[in-house]
Amino acid sequence: MNSIFSPVHTTQTRPFSERLIPRLKKAQSVVVLTGAGVSAESGISTFRDPDGLWADFKPEDLATPEAFRRNPKRVWEWYAWRREKIKTVRPNPGHFALAELEMFFPKFTLITQNVDGLHLLAGSKNVLELHGNIHRNKCFTCQNIYPEEVESKEIPPRCNCGGWLRPDLVWFGEMLPAGVLEKSYDLARDCEIFFSVGTSALVHPAASLPICAKERSAFLVEINPNQTEISHLADQVILGKSGEILPQLVSSLVPS
Ligand code: OAD
């Protein structure tokens, strides 16, 4: 039977069941999958919430190779706008708690769908970026990697090969970065505890990772203010914001 806990209203109330913390204290291998919800408390919009990016913009106009081919300037400028926003924000307590959590386990990997780089900024070390990183560019033609800032009079800027530059992230219909998905599946298959945090679990293959972990008998924990596609599979669903729940989770592991 899955247990669903209420959102936390005070710092005194810990939303964790008796089953989770003792298990976590003994665990050797932990994997955390994060999504846009983890950055929401930093002020970055999610995608599918009512105020998310996909409520105002169409992914097929902005986040596919076809869209870029059709209108490279428009796509470049949309990402330039997102980059400017991301530059103004800081990691939130959820990011910092995940960086701390890493130190408790011999094997810990943070797999993120986020492209904002905030986990690395918060100090997480073992991070797999499944959907790339908005702070890099790459050539649409030859795949050569470039930094975020590129001097150019043209929009989008051009690669030395003449191709257009684009942000180095994964668009709909594209393959995930070579090796990263395979490594993520291996980790999901082998871990004892898998956390799915701040993701709607709607976009595959990332959303297959918690399912794969659960099939291989990992203890599956979801942290999200709302139920998702995978809530029914989770051993524990903790309803709440990651910036509130994760710091409490870390505190629960510190010996008193
Ligand atoms: P979504 O926008 O689909 O889902 C965000 C999730 O975060 C929702 O389930 C919210 O309930 C939850 N959420 C909102 N605020 C939260 C908070 N403070 N704490 C915890 N959770 C919160 O975003 P993703 O699941 O990340 O792909 O979307 C997956 C992929 O779809 C993205 O990587 C992006 C997008 O299109 C590409 O760009 C390729």
Image: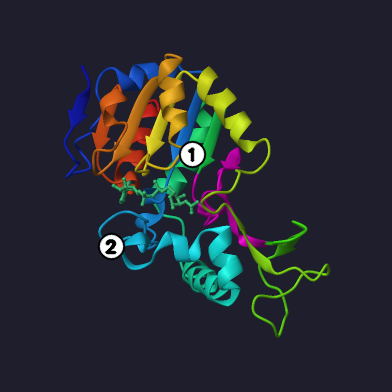
The quadrant where residue 252 appears: top left
For the view shown, which residue lies furthest in the right direction? 160
Magenta residue span: 113-137
At horizontal 54% and vertical 73% (from top left) the residue drawn is 80
| Quarter of the picture holding the C terminus | top left
* Secondary structure at numbered mark 1: helix
- Residue 161 x, y percent position in the rendering: 83, 67
Q: Residue at x 60, y 41 (%)?
A: 125
Badge 1 residue CB within 8 Å of ligand 1: no
Question: Considering only order in the chain, which callout, 1 or 2, is on the residue closer to the N terminus?
Answer: 2
From the viewer's perspective, is residue 164 above or below residue 121?
A: below
Q: Is residue 107 left or right of residue 5?
A: right
> Which one is in front in this view, the residue at disc 2 or the one at disc 1?
2
Residue 218 makes an appearance in the image: no
Q: Quadrant of residue 44?
A: bottom left
Three-letter residue code for mark 2: Asp
For label 2, being within 8 Å of ligand 1 is answered no
The answer, for residue 158, to whether it is visible in the render is yes
Q: Quadrant of the N terminus?
A: top left
- Residue 113 location, x and y as percent? 49, 46
Circle 2 sits on which residue?
51
SS at mark 2 in the image: loop
Judging from the image, the colouring scheme is: rainbow
